[in-house]
Image (tube, grey):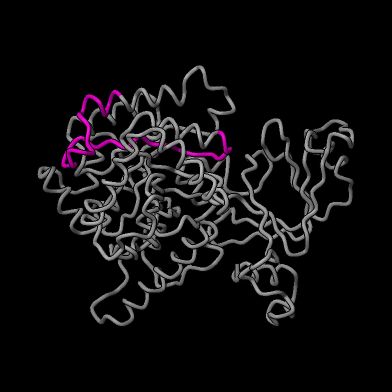
Amino acid sequence: MASAQYAVFLGCIVDTPVMGQLRVRTNSALGVDRSTGRIIGVTEQPELSSAELVSAWVGRTVASEAVESVSLTADQFLMPGLIDTHTHAPQFAFLGIGHDLPLMDWLNKYTFKHESEFKDADLARRFYKDVIARIVRNGVTFAAYYGTIHLESNRVLAQTIRQIGQRAYVGKVCMDANSPAYYSESTEDSLRDTEEFIGQVLGDEVDEEQKRLVTPIITPRFVPTCSHECLEGLGALAEKYQLPVQSHLCENPSEIEFARSCFPDSPSYAHIYHKYGLLNSRTIMAHCVHLSDSEIALMRESKASISHCPNSNFSLGSGIADIRRFISEGIPVGLGTDVGGGYTPSILDAMRMAAAANRALIAFRRDSSDSQPAQGSSDKPLEAAEALFLATQGGARVMGMDEQLGSLDANKLFDAIVVDMNAPNSPVPPVDATPAVRDAECPDEAWRLRLEQF
């Protein structure tokens, strides 16, 4: 019944519509209108048939032939798709290499060299198909991608994502200063190609369904590789087309020093982006490990968001971001894999690493007599439900899509995955082998414990 207009999923539904609040609907029905990709209704403890449920949700009689029922097993659950708010598609070419180096040395030795190879669009055609498929296999239904400086290879990246069916932001990387001669561009070329890429992604030849999947995102690599004129032009393009913006901020102390040396009149690294109209409610700043108090205040006032990339922050020795403080300040936070600074495209890993980073920060404060939580921070460990929120609803908020994605509610887009905890080679032990789960007082508690294992 793949041609049926409606699908009804029957079983356990898990999401976190609010930070820290795990919602487990153990016996529920969720309906989807395949023509719009939206959820038409959710009913707990359903007593009607799937066709009757759909009829009630849409307000008219729907024949059973128009409805496909999908029954989940006792070990499966439906949840929102995972959201990767920061990754680099071309860097899968050297995944896991060079993590003995600090950020700036790693960029100069490996990153720029490998990314420069994508001047060959045929390489992009061969390479990106496997990259996007691998990311989707990790349950990522929405991602913010950095491409390279090359117009045609970025077009191939966007086209590949559409063909596979993932939702994405795709950015043409801009770098017209302090870059190696073999991987650099003029200011004029950078701005012209960025605007041409925007036109290609949003152009009239692209149908509406494809436009909904892929959105161009303004992408200055980071302040040190962009001139005043480039940043100014990118800010103008972001405003002209009302597009999201992504870049890196305060990842590493040497990077911060480099950025400040390029713009010595700016009061801080973050203020440089702000000056050029690149720090606003559509902005995603990756890392933010070493934000000053004034920069945190500016991020809050600008309504910009943070992509927390704990794997990369550990792998390149950049430091530990205090996401508890960001959240308490009202700054939206999501998770990013930051491949290839991070060594895996798994958002599950990012969830686990976020919890580990939080605990490491707490332990550091405990063991350092002169280190106390900053104002607005907390020594409360990050819980599984909070990590899940950051990977779903929190990520949707960072991407500016929280009213459309991130939880499984009526009228939202059905970006979702089915998790099977009894799949071959599953890392989750069976219920019978876990007394805490087997003997739980109620089904909701049993599911909460299994999700912690997941």
Percent x, y of residue 72: 77, 56
Range of magenta residues: 163-192
Q: Quadrant of the C terminus?
A: bottom right
Is 348 displayed left or right of 377 in the figure? right
The residue that appears at 57% across and 24% down in the rendered structure is: 208
Q: Residue 2 at what x, y percent from top left?
A: 78, 37
Residue at horizontal 34 percent and vertical 24 percent from the top: 195
Seen as rendered, the residue at the extreme top is: 204
Q: Quick one: 76 or 244, which is closer to the camera? A: 76
Image coords of residue 243 (percent x, y) = 40, 31
Q: Which of the pair 210/123 is nearer the observer?
A: 123
From this view, report whether residue 199 is shown above or below residue 183: above
Residue 358 lies in what quarter of the image?
Answer: bottom left
In the displayed structure image, the side of residue 191 where residue 443 appears, left or right: right
Quadrant where the N terminus is found in the figure: top right
Does the segment drawn in magenta span residue 71?
no
Q: Which residue is drawn at 40% across and 38% down?
A: 123
